[in-house]
Image: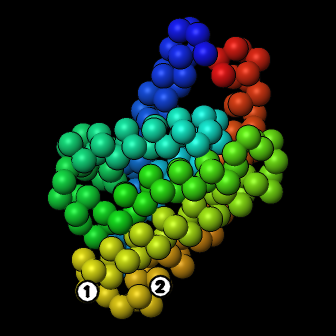
Amino acid sequence: MNNKGKLKTYLMVALMAAIISVVSPFSIVIPISPVPITLATFAIYLTVYLLGCKYGTISTIIYVLLGFIGAPVFTGFTGGVAKVLGPTGGYIIGYIFLALIEGLIIGDRYEGAFFSFLGMIVGTVVLYAFGTVWLTISMHMTISEALFAAVVPFIPGDIIKMVLAYVSGKKIKTLLIKAGII
């Protein structure tokens, strides 16, 4: 990759980290759950679809690090170590593994719906696992309480986000390729 190609890649990584950071703070609180609904998963699905495993994961890590150091990029425009150590911290850390696993499964098969959805689904299951385990520890909940509060209500919305990320990602990727950006 030449210097111009590297610059384009780095700019796309920064842009996608910025997009994740901009959409993630907007949230809806469900009365039965300490975990709000956000667009973070949608943005991460899309980021990995567009940038692949390595650069999609790097964008997600940048987002998590921005929040960790205090930038208001987490739900409700919050950030900081306390947020990462709070009840939703497992989901925040889980975002990194969502991106990594989605990217590993999709691999070079960007156009295939099967591997795209498989990557998003398996990555989301791992995200749910991280979030659920941390929620049980931090909120002194049972696994079943945590699952019914912070996983089950989110499944339909996450499926919708996956479909939207795949459909929009396919169109955006085509445009970026035509423009010579990726």
Residue at image position (71%, 30%) is 173
Whether residue 74 is visible to the viewer of this picture, yes or no, is: yes
Whether residue 160 is visible to the viewer of this picture, yes or no, is: no
Judged from the image, the secondary structure of the residue bearing numbered disc 2 is: helix
| Residue 108 vs residue 86, the one in the foreground | 108
Query: In the rendered view, would you say 138 is above or below 118?
Result: below
Query: In the rendered view, would you say 34 is above or below 166?
Result: below
Q: Are marks 1 and 2 in contact (CB under 8 Å)?
A: no
> What residue did someone put label 1 on?
140
Residue at image position (34%, 54%) is 75
Residue at image position (48%, 70%) is 128
Say how many tags the image has.
Answer: 2
Mark 1 to mark 2: distance in Å?
14 Å
> What residue did someone put label 2 on?
148
Query: Which quadrant is the C terminus positioned in?
Result: top right
169 lies left or right of 34 = right
Tell me which amino acid carries mark 1. Answer: His
Tell me residue 159's x, y (percent): 66, 63
Residue at image position (67%, 54%) is 105
Which dot, 1 or 2, sits closer to the camera?
Answer: 1
Tell me residue 115's x, y (percent): 76, 54
Q: Tell me if mark 2 has few (under 14), some (14-19) or many (20+) residues whose alpha carbon lies within 10 angstroms of its own.
A: some
| Residue 11 vs residue 36, the one in the foreground | 11
Q: Earlier in the sequence, mark 1 or mark 2?
A: 1
